[in-house]
């Protein structure tokens, strides 16, 4: 099994990119680990090309306006996350520049009828 500082958190969903992984904890906390080539870990203050060997939680208040994450998808060097309120966040090298969630405003969800909202991304 896994040890370290995250052993108590049950993971409910895991995605992987080229050299990194992201996982959602049962409480909606998002964890990332692996190589941070272009900001794909989303960890503020982490240098490019650094590596995190253990899952590290992204700060919910700073990154996701206090909301938990309900779904994630990883590309080669980027992550896309959907928060509980339907906001969509993208960071890493998503074809436009390098970001961490704290420096990126959420994308506006598409216009949907009031009873519908974004719940998954791919």
Image: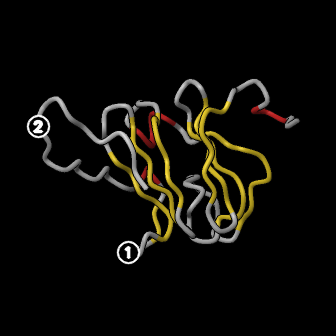
Q: Position of residue 48 (x, y in %)?
A: 63, 70
Mark 2 vs 1, N-terminal side: 1
Nearer-the-camera pick, 76 or 105: 76
Q: Position of residue 117 (x, y in %)?
A: 24, 37
Residue drawn at (60%, 51%) of the image:
15
For the residue carrying disc 1, how many other residues have a C-alpha within 10 Å: few (<14), some (14-19), or many (20+)? few
Nearer-the-camera pick, 122 or 5: 122
Residue drawn at (66%, 54%) of the image:
21
Q: Which element is circle 2 on?
A: loop
Q: Position of residue 16 (x, y in %)?
A: 63, 57
Residue drawn at (39%, 44%) of the image:
120
Residue 70 against residue 39 in the figure, above or below: above
Residue placed under numbered mark 2 in the picture: 113
Q: Which element is circle 1 on?
A: loop
Residue placed under numbered mark 1 in the picture: 96
Residue 31 against residue 53 in the figure, above or below: above
Residue 4 sits in which quadrant? Answer: top right
């Amino acid at each position: 099994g896994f040890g370290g500082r995250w052993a108590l958190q049950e993971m409910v969903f895991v995605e992987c990119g080229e050299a990194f992984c992201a996982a959602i904890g049962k409480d909606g906390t998002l964890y990332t680990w692996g190589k941070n080539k272009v900001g794909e870990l989303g960890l503020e203050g982490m240098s490019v090309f650094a590596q995190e060997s253990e899952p590290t939680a992204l700060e919910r208040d700073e990154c996701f306006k206090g909301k938990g994450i309900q779904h994630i998808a990883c590309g080669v060097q980027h992550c896309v996350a959907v928060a509980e309120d339907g906001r969509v966040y993208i960071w890493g090298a998503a074809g436009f520049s390098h970001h961490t969630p704290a420096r990126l405003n959420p994308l506006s969800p598409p216009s949907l009828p009031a009873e519908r909202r974004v719940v998954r991304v791919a």
